[in-house]
Image (cartoon, rainbow, N blue to C red):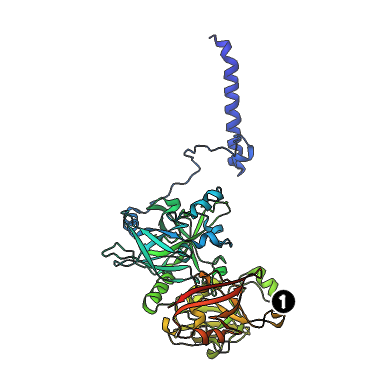
Amino acid sequence: MEIKKLVPYAIVGISSALITIGAFSYAMNNNTSLSDFNLFQKDPSKTYFTSASYASSPVLNPPDLTEAAEKTVNAVVSVKNYSSRAQQQQSFNPFDFFFGDPFGDSQPNQRQQQQQQKDVPSGLGSGVIISADGYIVTNNHVISGADKIEVTLNNQKTYTATLVGTDPNTDIALLKIDEKNLPVLNFYNSDNVKVGEWVLAVGNPFGLTSTVTAGIISAKGRSLGLIRSNSTAPIESFIQTDAAINPGNSGGALVNSNGDLIGINTAISSHSGAGTYEGYGFAVPSNIAKKIVEDIRQYGMVQRGMLGIGTMDLSDEEGVRQYNARNKTSYKTQQGILVETVQDDGGAKDAGIKKGDIITTIESTPVKNFATLSGIIGEKRPGDKVNVTVLRDGSTKNFTVKLKDSKGNTKLKTKDDMSASEKLGASFKELSDQQKVNYGLDSGVVVTDADSNGKLASIGVTEGYIIMDVNDKPVNSENDIEKILKNYKGTVSVRYIDSYGRVYRRGFKMD
């Protein structure tokens, strides 16, 4: 080709290079992103390969996580929930938003067909072996409503697990399989976990066994309002991480760089329809999980210590605004918890805490928000003492509070000490005169604070339903139910009305 024919091409090439260099120089000198020039238009609907960029900063001296991963994978199991109730219950599960649906919602007809097959699980999650003789911790929502729970180890051995106990208030459950000499993970003191620390999330996302992802702790003491709809007194003080967590990871391990268990992966914050990973996951701190499983193993039930107060989170700007408007007060948004009410039989009143006090510190830890308070109290039992600092009329005051249970007692209980309402997994209140007229009833109680894993939930009774009689005896109060079922063992018959006014009779066995 003649030289003069190459000149136009050379001019175009040189011009393009000059434009690019000029744009780059302008961007660098004016703190402007190259994307502002739209030099490289891409179709956002397509997938593109990524390549190295000088704008990317390399990770300096990342920790070697191979030993932690090797130590963890053998102690994390797959948990399958086989439930006939899943076909019957169509109520909203808040974990579907945060954690997605392991079977995917894009093919609902196919999912319904799968659930009708006994050999197909209705739920899939993970679990962590915490003792060599087969105790496994997982999430309550992973095994909720299960007729059968199946556990598969990393070596592909499969077992039918026994549900030892659950705690919807923390979304923790304890399982047991019949095996010995199993690999275990040790609980680590989650109070010592630091933001910025490297961690691994280990579980079975989308059924992919023994999957390990890495990230850092991005925050502590997070409250999502996630557990509230399934519990009577939720405890949320999550560890937040950017290690990738997806459907199927729930109940799996969050470990530090030494392979110590610092949390139980529970949820992800996701706006995608499938509830897949978009940046942040949340784990129940190991201190809370450890306390729950110890309670279940030792006492057969969870021991809940309470301050005995009603509160308002002063760090919640919208909540403070509404509170001020409702009560004609002028509280400012700040760290701390406002004491709204003080229970007559609670430990706070005994110690001298009053309505209007602002809790600023508990156990030497600054109370940033309700999650901080909830997390610390969640590690305690009735009878434990906690040091509380409050701000009252501009002065700081210190109190030692002896925690009590929901009934105002400091004594630890066992299953034999449980009330009938505790065994049923609900509270009850009397019908109003207007409700009796509306439903044409002479007797009945309204179900409140229903536990999703309680006896009543097992027969489809949930909050707001009306129980007319128990064992063919009319009930008008919680005391009536206590009298009928106190020390009772055998089949219990319940006649109730659902939210649509339909009458049912169902039964279950009381141990």
Residue at the image position 60 percent from the left and 36 percent from the top: 43
Q: Residue 328's x, y, as percent?
A: 73, 78
Dot 1 corresponds to which residue? 438
> Is residue 20 in view?
yes
Q: Secondary structure at mark 1?
A: helix
Q: Residue 157's x, y, as percent?
A: 31, 56
Q: Residue 345's x, y, as percent?
A: 55, 89
How many numbered callouts? 1
- Give, as a three-letter code, the residue at label 1: Asn
Q: Nearer the viewer, residue 368 or 154?
A: 154
Quarter of the rendering occupied by the C terminus? bottom left
Q: Quadrant of residue 310?
A: bottom right
Residue at the image position 48 percent from the left and 68 percent from the top: 171
From this view, report whether residue 400 is shown above or below residue 163.
below
Residue closest to the far left: 181
From this view, report whether residue 226 is shown above or below residue 345.
above
Q: Residue 205's x, y, as percent?
A: 44, 53
